[in-house]
Image (spheres, rainbow, N blue to C red):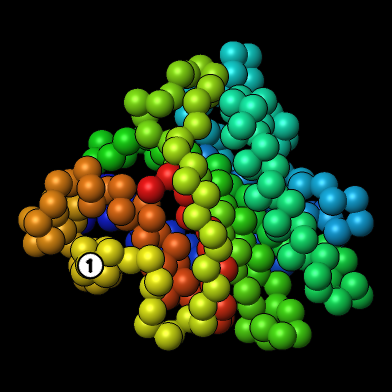
Amino acid sequence: MDDLTALWYNSRFRAAEADAALDVAHQQVKLLNWGSARKFGIINRANRHLLLFEHAAPAPEYLPDGDHDSGWPTIDWFLQLLRPVDQQFVAKSLEKVHQFLESLPPDDYPNYRLSFDFCCDNQPSHAHRLLMHFRYLAPVPQFPEGLCLFWAYSIDSAQLHSPPLRAFGRLPGLEPVLFRRGEGNYPSFSDKRRPMLELLRQGRSVKQIAQLVGCSEATVSNTLVYLRQHVYVANNPQLVYYFSCFYGY
């Protein structure tokens, strides 16, 4: 099992701990050592503020000078590294999260438990990437077994100017997809993505998947970034609905 495949399996087995970490009271959060650079946060419905909590130090090359200890302290730090058009795009995505949360009954969940992670992977088998995820794991009346929101952004290493991070990946602006877990229908999958996912579940390496599917290792690596959330959902039966919006591919 190569490093990339191991990373995906690690994410699967740590999912229960991540869920436990998001079981918070007010503005407290249990910090986990999960990933090279990841943060958990809470959206507070009252003031619409996203709180970030660091629990693993990101790689120094992704940090601004003089800030190697604190990681990304706020969402503002991240936004100011992006081009104005991308700042607007991220802000629009955050607004979608708020709109969804505000559509729920007002007295059920005063502090919505959400994760906001930065994950910088420097595995030798694929390019540096920065992913931004939002996962809403608290149950709601219409989805008693939980709901998962997932916005993902990806940056290729060739587009990075570091330190600090200045460029953002391609953002075609695909619309969100909502489907029931277990329906067996991944709406936007190509013919090759589905067998890639199955081979990943079997523990095959990136090199093996590339040979079996008939494509380059780079294509497999890029696709696995896209497929990561499906592996997560498939191995977390408490997440019945899965709301996702993909960017960068």
Locate residue 35, reporting x and y percent. Answer: 47, 47
Can you tell which quarter of the image residue 115 is in?
bottom right
User: Is residue 78 shown to the viewer in this render?
Assistant: no
Q: Callout 1 environment at 10 Å: few (<14), some (14 to 19), or many (20+)?
A: few
Q: Position of residue 182 (x, y in %)?
A: 43, 85
Q: Is residue 110 left or right of residue 84?
A: right
Which quadrant of the structure image shows residue 129?
Answer: top left
Q: Position of residue 142 (x, y in %)?
A: 72, 85
State the quadrant of the N terminus. bottom left
Would you say 26 lies left or right of 187 here?
right
Pick the front one: 222 or 19: 222
Let me know if residue 1 appears in the view: yes
- Residue at image position (61%, 32%) is 85
Instruction: Write the residue at 63% across / 14% down.
Output: 66
| Amino acid type, mark 1 | Asp
Q: Position of residue 101 (x, y in %)?
A: 77, 65
Label 1 residue SS: loop
Circle 1 residue? 191
103, above or below 173, in the image: below
Q: Please name the residue shown 49% across and 42% down the image.
A: 171
Who is closer to the viewer here, 246 or 133? 246
